[in-house]
Image (cartoon, rainbow, N blue to C red):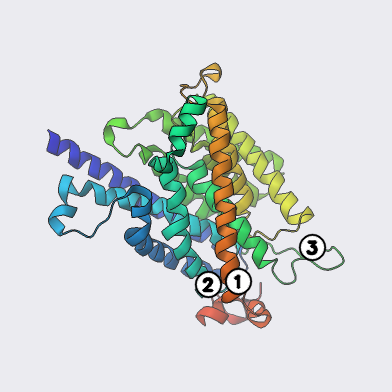
Amino acid sequence: MDSFKTSADVLFILLGAIMVLAMHAGFAFLEVGTVRRKNQVNALVKILVDFCVSTLVYFVVGYGIAYGVHFFGNAATLTQSSGYDLVKFFFLLTFAAAIPAIVSGGIAERARFGPQVMATALIVGLLYPFFEGVVWNGNLGFQAWLEARFGAPFHDFAGSVVVHAFGGWVALAAVLLLGARRGRYSRDGGISAHPPSSIPFLALGAWILTVGWFGFNVMSAQKLETINGLVAVNSLMAMVGGTLAALVAGRNDPGFVHNGPLAGLVAVCAGSDLMHPLGALVTGGIAGGLFVWMFTLTQNRWKIDDVLGVWPLHGLCGTWGGIAAGIFGSEMLGGLGKVSFAAQLTGTLAGVATAFAGGAAIYGVIKVFVGLRLDPEQEHEGADLAIHRISASPERETLW
């Protein structure tokens, strides 16, 4: 029976890893549908290459920093407990690789390929595992201090802060250092619209992400015996809340509608195992409205050219999710309790500070010593032809 249980856990977390791996196709097609046609090939290549680089650095360095586990023994050692430690690495790798996938959407259409790969290696190999280990493995005593101070540690069941807010705030640093796409904003205050190239591809990416998210959230239990249907229903309710709020706030705009479920799912990750379903619905609804409002504000008023809106979607909705777990996870609002609002606020702010400062340091150093942007001619030509020497569509159509 012990052997059967171990094998069942291996299969459970393996299926979760596969579902989250599939989400990277969602990241790719969401970006493909949002960028102009002359940058579609680059979007596809970036997501795949970033995932592969993430795998290497997380296997060699990052996983050890986060959990103190290394994979340099012989095969017999690696396959103990039916290889559960290996598939757990695979599952958590898919989370780690989401960070550069998030960043990719923010810096699309003007970032050089090589420097972005370098940044991916540093983020997934060093920066992200540092904070991941602090929250999910109790490194450096931060969680113990929060529990002693506020009566509960920082709770982030499936990564509203550890993954999504972290990726979004790293992306904001990168976007600010890169600057806007050429021609996006004029000196006289005018704004040049760069509409999505393909709403169907954008919608496909959103749907792939939405379906895979149930593996992201539910299978964060990591073992079959701790699976909880509450996580699935809360994820569903947050998705619905985010979609409907984005529909109303975005006035039927299809780009907002298809990002709405993602906003809700980002926000519910942290407290999906604690909240009442109605709390999850409200959490998702607030996230959907927050995304629409902040995307519009950052693009049109603050003139921050975050192409896919990854800072509002992941950075801000993830930040809200960390705090919301401390609100709707409380017994007073129908949650399971054992969570502290003060601990949630402190842990969330720690994640935001680590991500933004770390992202600014990594991209800042690369900008100084290597450079981040394509030159003006390459950016006008498009990353597909400038970097990959091939376009996604006939050459006469690659400009828009």
The total of numbered circles placed on residues is 3
SS at circle 2: helix
Looking at the rendered structure, which numbered label has been put on residue 191? 3
Looking at the rendered structure, which numbered label has been put on residue 259? none
The residue under the point 64% across, 35% down is 286
Which of pointers 3 and 2 lies earlier in the amino acid sequence? 2
SS at circle 1: helix
Q: Picture coordinates of residue 295 (x, y %)?
A: 69, 50
Residue at the right extreme, as displayed:
188
Q: How far is disc 1 from disc 2 in space, using C-alphas? A: 8 Å
Q: Amino acid at mark 1?
A: Lys
Q: Are marks 1 and 2 in contact (CB under 8 Å)?
A: yes
Residue at the top extreme, as displayed:
332
Q: How far is disc 3 from disc 1 in space, using C-alphas? A: 26 Å
SS at circle 3: loop
Task: Residue under label 1, please give it.
Answer: 367
Tag nearer the camera, 1 or 2: 1
Q: Quadrant of the N terminus?
A: top left
The residue under the point 19% across, 58% down is 73
| Mark 2 Cα-neighbour bin, 10 Å: few <14, some 14–19, many ≥20 | some
Q: Picture coordinates of residue 80 (x, y %)?
A: 16, 48
Which of pointers 1 and 2 lies earlier in the amino acid sequence? 2
Q: How far is disc 3 from disc 2 in space, using C-alphas? A: 28 Å
Q: Quadrant of the C terminus?
A: bottom right
Q: Picture coordinates of residue 241 (x, y %)?
A: 58, 34
- Of 93 and 216, which appears nearest the observer? 93
Which of pointers 3 and 1 lies earlier in the amino acid sequence? 3
